[in-house]
Amino acid sequence: MKLINHLDPSQSRLGYLSCLALVAGRQLDTRQGLVDRFCRFIFQPIDAHDSRWVEFMELVDKSELNRIKPQVDEKLAELSELFRVKPDLGPSYTLQSLWLAQHRLTSHVGHLAKKDAVRILEMARSFEILTTGYALSEKGVFLQSFVSYVFPGAIDGVPRCNPFAVTERLSLQLFFLYALLSVDILTPFLLQAFAESSEGDLLIAPKLLGPAAYKLVEAVERITDVSSIDAIRESRTFAERTENMSIARNQARPRYHHLFELQLLDRVEADESGNRTVPYIANDACRRAGRVLSPLCERPDEQQDLIDRKFFSWSAAIFDRTARPCGEDTLRLLYFARGYEHLQREIGFTPGRTIALAGCLLALEEGWIIEVAEMFDLMRRMAAGPWRPYLEYSGGSRLDQEFLIKIKPSLIPALEDALSRETSSASGEANQ
């Protein structure tokens, strides 16, 4: 069982994980080195002299842009006056501000201050995007590859390639949901709490976070044995911390906004005693999630196993996608091979778990439900199947929790040709 114990309000945007993945690498790194590259990327200034300026101005909501623009640094202004440095007369904004203020985003909150940049590294480690050595994990490598694929000019700050638009592509949206469910068992309990509430919840005084945390404690205690004592202690400590309203606000803000970004909650303007409030409330996707994720609430100790066996059927139901289970091994293998294209290493073998995840994500986009556990079973059987010449397993592979593999580039065209011949044959038989 995995639970994120600490979140910070500065970690409210999932898009910052995309931005961090773009500047990180597979090699070991230093915290300060990665923070510096991250800051140079998202805080790069853009003004009217920049070739991207006109396009950015066409895409942004001007009122939101002015609202999130950082205030003038008074000390810097005094130093400029003291040393008679000529002020810049034209407007200038950071890259992150221009992306966050775009009309295409449904919310413009979560603007990051430079002093909080290191918090995004902490968030990435919580989401298992970064390792303890500040290198990209296999999930992080997939995120980097897929963000570059969906937003091909993002690393160059192209205006329309906005990495904060996490719902731009279903695979990207579901990747973040998969990552969130895998590392934070509180999420399904929180979705159930929202689904059962008609009023929703406010960030200034969250009422649903604490009860959801205590329901998690009850679930863990119900299935407890000697091996889960640490899980009980961890979940109870977290629940007790939420009784402090200041801590509850800090914990609720990023969690609620992550669910909103993933289209599992809505935000609505309301009036409370003459004051404008913006509560988060359940939408249809949240209510469906509350139902289909109930196995996670019943067996939090089986968190990863359930996700591996059910996540994509859950996702199809939650987001009301027309999709059907894939019963054809050739097609499953094709999606696995396509996932490999996003993760393959230049030298050596590639861990198969994230390849399986990538292939399943790509499959659901095209209307096929394939689960990660199915991919593992497939690759176990393929080790002695007709496609074995295209597959090279590491001598140290274990086909249970992980395996290492190389795939020959010629596999994809061979699979596509085989599927084409199967379709033609089936069509001919139908016509007869």
Image (cartoon, rainbow, N blue to C red):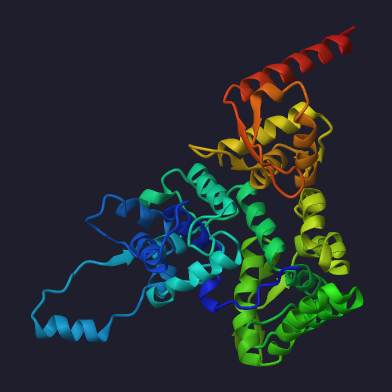
User: What residue is rendered at 43% in x and 59% in y?
Assistant: 99
User: What residue is rendered at 10% in x and 86% in y?
Assistant: 82
Q: Is residue 258 rendered to the left or right of residue 323?
A: left
Residue 155 visible (yes or no):
yes
Quadrant for the N terminus in the image: bottom right
The number of numbered badges drawn on the structure is 0
Q: Position of residue 337 (x, y in %)?
A: 64, 32
Q: Look at the picture and state if 236 lies above or below 170.
A: below
Q: Look at the picture and state if 51 lies above or below 328.
A: below
Q: Position of residue 96 (x, y in %)?
A: 41, 63
Q: Which quadrant would residue 261 be assigned to in this image? A: bottom right
User: What residue is rendered at 66% in x and 73% in y?
Assistant: 4
Q: Is residue 330 rendered to the left or right of residue 252?
A: right
Q: Position of residue 380 (x, y in %)?
A: 78, 36
Residue 278 visible (yes or no):
no
Pick the front one: 346 or 36? 346
Quadrant for the C terminus in the image: top right
Q: Position of residue 414 (x, y in %)?
A: 65, 19
Q: Which quadrant would residue 31 be assigned to in this image? A: bottom left
Which residue is at the far front?
Answer: 395
Which residue is at the far top?
Answer: 432
Q: Which quadrant would residue 188 be assigned to in this image? A: bottom right
Pick the front one: 71 or 255? 255
Q: Look at the picture and state if 111 lies above or below 133.
A: below
Q: Is residue 35 rendered to the left or right of residue 183?
A: left
Q: Is residue 125 rendered to the left or right of residue 335?
A: left
Pick the front one: 353 or 320? 353
User: What residue is rendered at 68% in x and 34% in y?
Assistant: 335
